[in-house]
Amino acid sequence: MCAVEVADIFRQYGHVYRRSHEMPLNQLRAMRAIEVC
């Protein structure tokens, strides 16, 4: 069984979510930090 991490989901779907939802800058930065982690 392969574990799925939040970073994997952000990497795959984050750009779609960011395009369709307004987010404060601090949340965008946190999301990006998780993606590159």
Image (cartoon, helix red, strand yellow):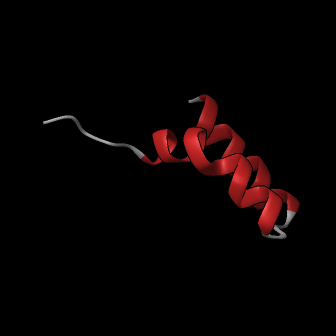
| Residue at image location 69% in from the left, 59% down from the top | 17
Left or right, 19 with reference to 7: right
Does 5 sit above or below residue 2?
below
Is 33 in front, or is 15?
Answer: 15
Answer left or right for 21 relative to 12. right
Q: Position of residue 33 (x, y in %)?
A: 67, 39
| The C terminus, quarter of image | top right
User: As rendered, which of 27 and 10 lies closer to the eye?
Assistant: 10
Q: Residue at x 59, y 38 (%)?
A: 11
Q: From the top left corner, tell me how far across and down residue 20 is, in percent.
A: 79, 66
Quarter of the image for the N terminus: give it: top left
Residue occupying the point 56% across, 41% down = 12
Above or below: residue 21 compared with residue 28: below
The extreme top residue here reads 36
Work out whether 12 lies above or below 19: above
Occupied quadrant, residue 35:
top right
Count of numbered labels shown in the rendering: 0
Residue 2, how many percent across, how many down? 21, 34
26 with respect to 4 (left or right)? right
Q: Picture coordinates of residue 34 (x, y %)?
A: 59, 41
Q: Residue at x 77, y 57 (%)?
A: 18
